[in-house]
Structures are given as structure tokens and as C-alpha cells.
């Protein structure tokens, strides 16, 4: 993998991790977790772990939807 891309995706993982730790709102944490997953996926593809990449690509959005349904805000 190109070194510049590797640094950019690694920075995405670190930024997503820091944002998850710092943020208090549950919805902000979900966005930060999505950033972490987006940063990890190119590393999985580079290593040839396409089966793990496929499962991650399917599970991450579905788990986000279930978490959003669990913590949704009630309308006034």
C-alpha cells in the first residue's frame, strides 16, 4: 500500500478513536465509530482478508442501524 495512503487511513483510525473517547453524544460516537471502520477497511483489503472485509462491510452498517433504533430520540 502506498505510504501516504497508509498514513491517511491510520490517521482516520486515530482521529475516529479520539473523537469517540471525547464526544458525549451517542450519535457523535456512532459517527466516530464509522470513521474508525472506514479507516480499517483498506488495511483489511491490503492484507487480502476479503472475507473479513465483506463481513465488516455488512455488519458495520447493520449494527449502526440497530444502535440508532435503540437510542433514538423521542419526538416532542
Image: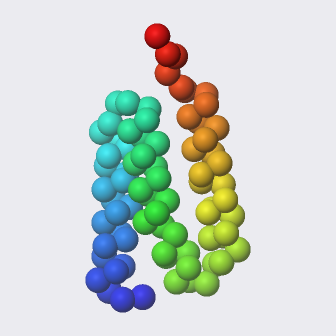
Q: In the picture, which quadrant includes the N terminus?
A: bottom left
Q: Quadrant of residue 11?
A: bottom left
Query: Can you name the residue that lies furthest to the bottom here?
Result: 2
Above/below status of 64 relative to 5: above
14 w.r.t. 64: above or below: below
Residue found at x 37% / y 51%: 17
Q: Work out whether 54 lies above or below 36.
A: below
Image spot of residue 21 (x, y percent): 35, 41
Visual colour scheme: rainbow
Q: Identify the residue at image location x=38%, y=44%.
A: 20
Q: Position of residue 2 (x, y in %)?
A: 36, 89
Q: Residue at x 42, y 46 (%)?
A: 31
Residue farthest along the front direction in this orientation? 76
Task: Please give left or right for residue 60 compared with residue 40 in the image.
Answer: right
Q: Is residue 8 above or below residue 30?
A: below
- Count of numbered circles in the view: 0
Q: From the viewer's perspective, is 29 left or right of 68?
A: left
Counting from the top left corner in percent of width and height, residue 69 is at 61, 31
Please report the residue visible at 32 percent of the width from the left and 36 percent of the height from the top. Answer: 23
Q: Is 5 displayed left or right of 34 in the figure?
A: left
Amino acid at each position: 500500500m502506498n505510504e501516504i495512503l497508509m498514513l491517511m487511513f491510520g490517521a482516520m483510525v486515530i482521529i475516529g478513536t479520539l473523537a469517540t473517547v471525547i464526544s458525549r453524544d451517542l450519535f457523535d460516537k456512532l459517527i466516530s465509530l464509522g470513521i474508525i471502520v472506514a479507516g480499517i477497511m483498506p488495511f483489511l483489503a491490503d492484507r487480502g482478508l476479503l472475507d473479513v472485509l465483506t463481513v465488516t462491510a455488512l455488519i458495520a452498517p447493520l449494527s449502526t442501524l440497530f444502535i440508532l433504533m435503540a437510542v433514538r430520540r423521542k419526538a416532542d
